[in-house]
Amino acid sequence: MITENESVRLIFGLKLRSLRLQKNLSYQQLSEESKITISYLHDIENGKKYPKADKILTLAKALGVDYDYLVSLSGDKKIQPLIDIISSEFINVIPWEHFGIAPATLLEIFTNTPDKVTAFITTLVKISRAFHLTKDNFYFTALQSFQDLHYNYFEKFENAANRWREESKLSDAIPITTEKLESILQKNYSIQIDRKKMGHSAVLNRLRSYYSPTKKTFYINKHLTNAQENFLLAREIAFQYLELNPRPLETIVQHSKSFDLLLNNLFASYFAAAILIPEGSIAEDFKQISSTSTWNGQAWLDILDKYNITTEMFIQRLTSILPHHFGINQLFFLRMYGSDKNGFDISKELHLSQLHNPHANLVNEHYCRRWGAITAIQNQQALPEKKKYKDLHIDIQISHYWQTQNRYLCITISKPPIDKKSENSGSVTLGLLIDGNLMKLMNFLNDPNIINKTVHTTCERCSIADCKERVSEPIQIQKYAKELEIKKAIESLDK
């Protein structure tokens, strides 16, 4: 985040550089005119220093402008758009520092090609307005990019989790019990657990937990499973043990006041997963379940019971372990929710190494019904009434993307509807790009019982003929065909 002082320095430096270049003055020449050292001028232009009043007067005289012009937060027509961007909320929404971009670097980017950079950033602003993208949208997308940058593996928090288990005398404890987690919160941090009060408020049903710093009480929604509770308790231990601040007090996070708050939430969740699912143990488990010559879905589900964890925790943990321990970094995580009646939505996603398919879209198109993520939900909903609300189901599919060389091994675990009133179900999917490395690791890839399907992104953009699963006409394909027809007709006029 760029502070107000940094913003003022950046604008002053921008104006100084712009004026110097307009006057065709080198650093040496301006230094001789102003009696200010070259190194200090360089620091001013790069937003590192803000000169005192006497030096500003000297610079104004050397550049032939008024003192007030230099210190004001406005500039000439050429640089005013850049000043507006530096002063805008948009620039502070972007967590520059987390992607290795310092304010001085930013200024250099702006001033080297001001017209092009201004046009580019203005375009981003216009797109965000046109698609009603909020600060929260941007933060969550930036967070995914941050995870991708680190292959979703954070050694610092893996080490901290191992240290915590040793200090808590839980090095060999699998699973860690709810009672033990509660005891640590109470004994080490004087935090009490309340499972009653949130349940009395219909408005708070969407929240899973809330921590009250004033009452030193951790409120948990009584409708959660034991595995969900354990994660929330472990996550609260993370906030306390790691002293993460700023932090959200509620789960699910309602609004992100800053990127740092969202980042600390990620770190706390990562630490919680690391103490509940130790990296060495889960890596060994993965070796075993991937070494079989045939697909064994039950072996994957057994891991959930071993650690007493949710499906999402399991799949998310694998997105950290696979790149670091097995070199498998071409992957995606997907959480879907919905039904044939209400439509399907991607409620969470993570892509490592590239933007894989499938991925979310904001144009209200219909996702391909051949995706394993959707097929698993449909299979779950098609179960007899007496079985529909009981068990998790795991499905596997090799998805070959239409007219590309890309094939993904998709492992999907579908969850039962919350209750009989709900028409929607959910699923989480781990997608792995099939390449030589994956084929060596996954011995069961040649299992003839694994379903192979040709898939696409959305029905509206799909040209697969006679698709039985299609729920919408290929509107975008038809539109492109008409445009091509017009182009050919125009070309024929020149013949």
Image: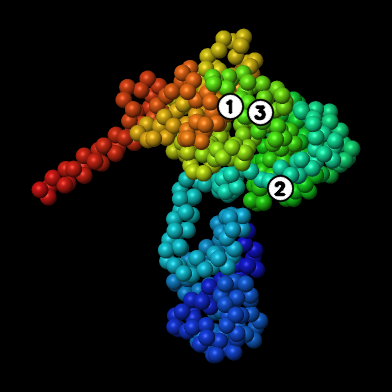
Residue 482 drawn at (x, y percent): 25, 38
Q: Mark 2 or 3, which is nearer the eye?
A: 3
User: Label 3 crowding class (10 Å Cα cut-off): few <14, some 14-19, many 20+?
Assistant: some
Describe the element under mark 1 as helix, strand or loop.
helix
User: Is residue 454 in view from this perspective?
Assistant: yes
Residue 378 drawn at (x, y percent): 51, 19
User: Is residue 374 in view from this perspective?
Assistant: no
Identify the residue position indicated by label 3 in the image: 285
User: Label 1 crowding class (10 Å Cα cut-off): few <14, some 14-19, many 20+?
Assistant: some
Q: Amino acid at mark 1?
A: Ser
- As drawn, the label of residue 290 is 1
Residue 9 drawn at (x, y percent): 61, 72
Q: Quadrant of residue 102?
A: bottom right
Residue that appears at 71% across and 37% down: 274
- As drawn, the label of residue 156 is 2
Describe the element under mark 2 as helix, strand or loop.
helix
Residue that appears at 45% across and 63% down: 118
Q: Amino acid at mark 3?
A: Asp
Rounded to the nearest whole Å, what is the CA distance between mark 2 and mark 3?
Answer: 23 Å
Counting residues from the N terminus, which is met first, the one under dot 2 or under dot 3?
Answer: 2
Nearest the viewer among 145 and 18 is: 145
Nearest the viewer among 184 and 11 is: 184
Q: Amino acid at mark 2?
A: Lys
Rounded to the nearest whole Å, what is the CA distance between mark 1 and mark 2?
Answer: 28 Å
**Eyeballing the image, is 256 above or below 80?**
above
Rounded to the nearest whole Å, what is the CA distance between mark 1 and mark 3?
Answer: 9 Å
